[in-house]
Image (cartoon, rainbow, N blue to C red):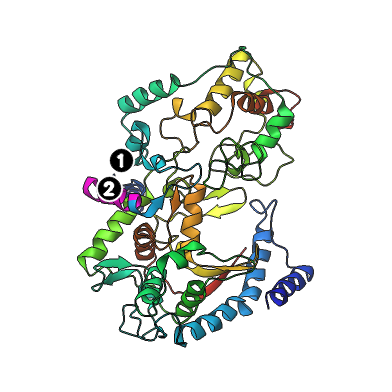
Amino acid sequence: MKKALISAGVVAAVAAGCATMEGSDPARQKQAVETMKQSFHARGIAKMDRLDQDELQRTCTDTRDQPSPEVQKRLEAAEMAKIKLPADGKFLGDWKRGRSIARRGRGMTWRDKPGKTSRGEPNGGGCYNCHQLSPQETSFGNVGPSLRQFGKLRGYGVDIQEYAYKKIYNAKAYSACSTMPRFGVSGTLTEQQIKDLTAYLMDPNSPVNK
Amino acid sequence: MRHALTLWITILLAAGFPIPQAAAQTDPKTAEEFDRFRAIMEEANPAELFEVKGEELWKKKRGPKNASLEQCDLGLGPGVVKGAYVQLPRYFADTGKVMDVEQRVVHCMITLQGFKYADLAKRPFSSANRTPDPVSIVTYIAAQSTGMKIAVPQSHPKEVETYQVGREIFFYRAGPWDFSCASCHGHDNLRIRTQPLPNFTKAEQAPRSFLGWPGYRMTGGVMHTLQWRLTDCFRQQRFPYLGYVSDTHAALLTYLGVNSNGHEYRGPGIKR
């Protein structure tokens, strides 16, 4: 029994060891950047400056998404400062338009146009790629947490509305190395689109809350 | 010929082999159905037609220099095709760098046959109406490694270095959406919509990056190589355009290939 426990402990330790990613190798990373700069080319809206990392991207890369608590706090504060709240002070748009933005995921690639997809539609948020939302949409990803009944579970108050708006605008303000894009900061979605998505999450009539 | 293939797929679909869409993530039966469908498709994989075309292109005298590719060294000596695919990318002394299969094929088409890179890079990927020659040639080369174990070499110092560079590229977060390859392929049990995302940092899942390529893609009915896969991944990562047969391709394929070593390569595959 004791032996079994010890073996289990060893297995767990080994597994934990494998799960811990090694950080960047600075010399190889320098080579990697040089290699990428030769390999990639500006095309359409995707210019070469997209390969340049900001401090957040660099820190998350180097630490394999595990910065120290102090650094994480500092980065999150800096990201929080980038959020622009709606000019009219209202967080909720139209949940039906929000549904369409949540379903569509196109935009921002070298095939697309500024602020629009190659087909001329507004950029999508691609929420369903990673999140569960409405029960009617059964094709959803799991990279992010389920957002089923987002408002119903948290309450429909203005504080939660503001949180949802800010989280969509800049997810990194809450989790520095989150996988979720900074939809407002990156210019992917407009203020109105983020309001529409916030309504999709927060309107009691939205299917998300049914 | 293409119409015949599309028809064949349509018949299979009509015969009750569904491609799972909704609910695949919750329904193991649907996933099972898809495996059955894929197994049937693999027995009559349209990729074989591209293998035949690739073999012709390999042996025929072509290009401004009117030469065949039979003197092309894929790493095992001039003209040796058998087993070459599962040992690429590898270091080549004549270019002084690690090259992947498509990069090497293009290199041979330029040096031996006199083709121009700019012409080959103009429209490098398959469409419904056109399959670029390197795609067929790579499919032919890949088929000659069917049943062999993936054995991407790490004996030359440049090969070790290229693996490490590939690893750094894999984890490099950038672009307007802050994505790296690892954002989608660095964790277990993730899905985009219903599409599973293998974790390429784990030895047991990494082969899923290599196996099944080149692949006949039922969506659109086209043959694609790993060149296309990586270029399109980076497009969706919202990076700039990844140039054709680049060193970034070679480095990443070295990383993925070495992580896949030891697994049996089952030949050109079929994709959803």
Residue B181: image tag: none
Q: Residue B191 appears at what percent x and percent y?
A: 56, 49
Q: Residue at x 36, y 57 (%)?
A: B248
Q: Residue A70 appears at what percent x and percent y?
A: 31, 25
Q: Residue at x 35, y 73 (%)?
A: B151
Residue underneath mark 2: A29
Magenta stretch encompasses residue A30: yes
Task: Tell me the subunit letter for badge 1.
Answer: A
Q: How many marks?
A: 2
The amino acid at mark 2 is Gln
Most foreground residue, B148 or B189: B148
Q: Residue at x 72, y 25 (%)?
A: A94
How many residues crowd mark 2 within 10 Å: few (<14), some (14–19), many (20+)? many
Does label 2 or label 1 sit earlier along the sequence?
2
Q: With A128 as the anchor, is B80 left or right in this view?
A: left
Residue underneath mark 1: A62
Magenta residues span A25-37
Evaluate if marks 2 and 1 touch, with contact meaning CB atoms under 8 Å apart. yes
